[in-house]
């Protein structure tokens, strides 16, 4: 079985820890960042299989993080899942502009995210 590496980007420490712990229990490798700058550097350094990025970060928006990752050859193909309290309808235009097709609504249950990520990564492995 492939061990996937997930980058979690969220400024709320307890949410990062909760998600990290649950993903690690399911044998995901997890790297985490609390700021946009740290997220970009971490993505380029660790080459994750997927990034979960919160929109509300302290130094820049999650949208800006996504834009920078998509514009750089090192991370242009990185699948990104947006983490937001907004509905897909409210963030759909920005997601489309950046080529992001998935989002997770807050509040969320870690088990739902794990199931979602497993399905998404399995599908992308089969498609790619």
Image (tube, helix red, strand yellow):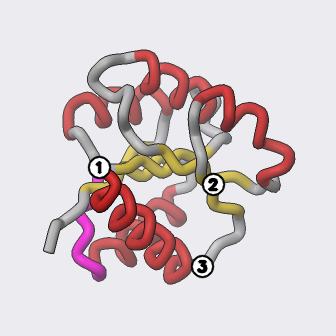
Q: Outermost residue, right direction? A: 90
Can residue 13 be seen by looking at this rendering? yes
| 3 left or right of 112 in image | left
Where is residue 86? Give x, y as percent. Answer: 80, 52
Are the residues tagged 3 and 2 within 8 Å (C-beta)? no
Q: Secondary structure at mark 2?
A: strand
The disc, 2 or 1, on the residue closer to the chain's N-terminal end is 2
Whether residue 30 appears in magenta in the rendering, the answer is yes
Look at the image and tell me in which quarter the N terminus lies. Answer: bottom left
- How far apart marks 2 and 1 lie (CA) works out to 21 Å
Question: Magenta span covers which residues?
Answer: 25-31
Between 4 and 9, the one nearer to me in the picture:
4
Of the residues tagged 3 and 2, which is closer to the observer?
2
- How far apart marks 3 and 1 lie (CA) works out to 28 Å
Q: Mark 2 highlights which residue?
A: 103
Q: Mark 3 highlights which residue?
A: 109
Task: Give residue 128's mark.
Answer: 1
Of the residues tagged 3 and 1, which is closer to the observer?
1
Between 66 and 93, the one nearer to me in the picture:
93
| Count of number-bearing discs | 3
Where is residue 81? Give x, y as percent. Answer: 53, 50
């Amino acid at each position: 079985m492939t061990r996937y590496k997930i980058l979690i980007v969220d400024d709320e420490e307890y949410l990062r820890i909760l998600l990290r712990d649950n993903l690690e229990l399911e044998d995901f490798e997890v790297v985490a960042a609390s700021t946009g700058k740290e997220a970009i550097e971490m993505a380029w350094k660790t080459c994750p299989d997927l990034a979960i990025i919160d929109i509300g970060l302290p130094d820049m928006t999650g949208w800006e993080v996504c834009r920078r990752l998509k514009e750089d050859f090192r991370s242009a193909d990185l699948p990104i899942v947006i983490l937001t309290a907004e509905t897909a309808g409210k963030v759909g235009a920005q997601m489309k502009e950046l080529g992001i097709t998935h989002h997770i609504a807050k509040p969320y249950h870690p088990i739902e995210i794990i199931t979602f990520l497993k399905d998404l990564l399995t599908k992308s492995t089969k498609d790619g």
